[in-house]
Image (cartoon, rainbow, N blue to C red):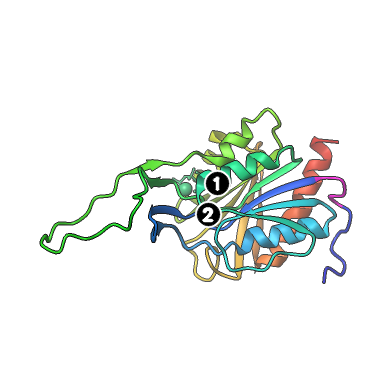
Amino acid sequence: ASGCFEHGLLTGRHVLINAGPTREAIDPVRYISNHSSGKMGFALAEAAAEAGARVTLVAGPVNLPTPPRVNRIDVVSALEMQAACESALPADLFIAAAAVADYRPADCATHKMKKDPKSSNGLTLELIPNPDILAGIARHAQRPWCVGFAAETHDVLAYAADKLERKNLDLIIANDVSAPGIGFNSDNNAVTLIDRSLHEEHLPMASKNKLARQIISHVAGRLATDKA
Ligand code: CTP
Ligand code: CA
């Protein structure tokens, strides 16, 4: 289905991508998660494979078919996603498209939690921070070229540039999720790519498949210059 997409742009490269939400267990039947559909990450995996890369896609719980020629590893929690991503190294390129839960319950109850029928009290869950998968890989001895996403509702470019710096990334893809019809769980998206010299490149609203190809072309070009 790729037609004229630039074949061979990533030939010989190993591309690692994570996608979708993570689920953090509260007890055997309940969890904390988010509305990420995984569509952007899966579209990127498909585009990278079309461009000739060997692709490892670490996927949280999503309802999407595996793109052709993509090696998919399914995970549930942030800790599992981190372990699967680190095991997949070395890679030439890491694209962190997953919406990793920032926190998880401090302990997962072994049995289904029961409510107290005699009490009208609420329930307080203790949450602890999850590791930052992307920042960890960007510090790794076998550091790939690192691309992050920043989904923001306000001050989009400033927050994205701050994440680029803080996580030591090569590129960040800023995503305004407050705009109607784009971003989380939508078929379309519009993004701005920001690199280490704070050069901004805007990719206007398009389908996630079209944007994925534009992003892969852009990143493949950068990779060819930086890692020749
Ligand atoms: N990320 C990650 N591990 C986490 C949290 C985020 O790898 N525990 C990655 C995401 O996959 C994304 C980038 O970091 O590529 C930015 O995620 P985002 O949620 O926007 O940033 P946070 O650092 O979590 O900050 P906040 O949610 O407070 O905006
Ligand atoms: Ca976050």
| In the depicted structure, whether residue 207 falls above or below residue 160 | below
| Residue 179: in magenta span | no
Residue 202: quadrant of the picture: bottom right
Residue 108 image offset from top left, x and y in percent: 37, 48
Residue 14 image offset from top left, x and y in percent: 78, 45
Q: Residues within 10 Å of mark 2 (few under 14, many from 20)?
A: some
Question: Which amino acid is tagged 2?
Answer: Val
Extreme residue toward the top, this view: 141
Residue at 28 percent of width and 57 percent of height = 113
User: In the rendered view, does 181 fall on the left or right side of 221?
Assistant: left
Residue at 56 percent of width and 69 percent of height = 186
Identify the residue position indicated by label 2 in the image.
76
Question: Which amino acid is tagged 1?
Answer: Glu
Q: Residues within 10 Å of mark 1 (few under 14, many from 20)?
A: some
User: In the drawing, what numbered circle is on residue 80?
Assistant: 1
User: In the rendered view, does 72 fall on the left or right side of 176?
Assistant: right
User: In the rendered view, does 226 fall on the left or right side of 169?
Assistant: right
Q: Which residues are magenta?
A: 9-13
